[in-house]
Amino acid sequence: MRVHSLSFAVVLGLLSTPALAADPTGLWQTPTRGGQVEITHCGNALCGRLVSSEGLKADPALKDVHNQNAGLRGRALKGLTILTGFTGGPSEWTGGSIYNADDGKTYSGSIVLDGDNRLKLRGCVIAPLCKTQTWTRLR
């Protein structure tokens, strides 16, 4: 009887402990061009920088040549911050910006963590003109 009481107490304790929310920080694989983005905390917000892509593997010195601001076209793509200002949590972050180096434009966005190893990144020109990508955690 004493063993059952102890087992029941342990199970009850596990059920009453809130599950820790998954953390969106880490290295993520994008579904296009072999992109890899490192998401970190930047103050109270999430941000992300481009770590690798097919283009960067072929030429690590690639520049941000499509940027709408001509003064920024000489900056390196490797390490470029492409996600900024996402706040919220524990599973959804909004109010951020997504920079797309392919067209040199910045979009409003949101991030939703879908389990521990997938996130949905949504970028919008203006709602409802949005596109969502699913990224997979690498580490």
Image (spheres, grey):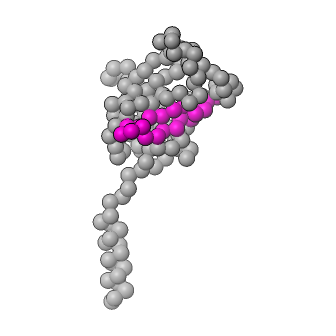
Counting labels gives 0
- 78 vs 46: above or below: above
Give the quadrant of residue 83: top left
Quadrant assignment for the N terminus: bottom left
Residue farthest along the right direction in this orientation: 58
Q: Between residue 7 and residue 38, name the one nearer to us.
A: 38
Query: Which residue appears at 58% of the width and 33% of the height?
Result: 51
Left or right of 88 on screen, residue 115: right
Front position in the image: 132 or 74 = 74
Q: Residue at x 66, y 26 (%)?
A: 60
Pick out the residue farthest to the top. Answer: 70
Q: Is residue 105 above or below residue 38?
A: above
* 41 left or right of 78 in image: left
Residue drawn at x 32%, y 77% as measured from the top left: 9
Question: Any magenta on residue 136?
Answer: no
Residue farthest to the bottom?
A: 1
Q: Can residue 51 be found in the magenta stretch?
A: yes
The image quarter in which residue 45 lies? top left
Q: Which residues are magenta?
A: 36-54
Residue 127 appearing in the image: yes
Q: Where is residue 81 shown, x and y percent of the image?
A: 49, 29
Q: Main secondary structure of the magenta part?
A: strand
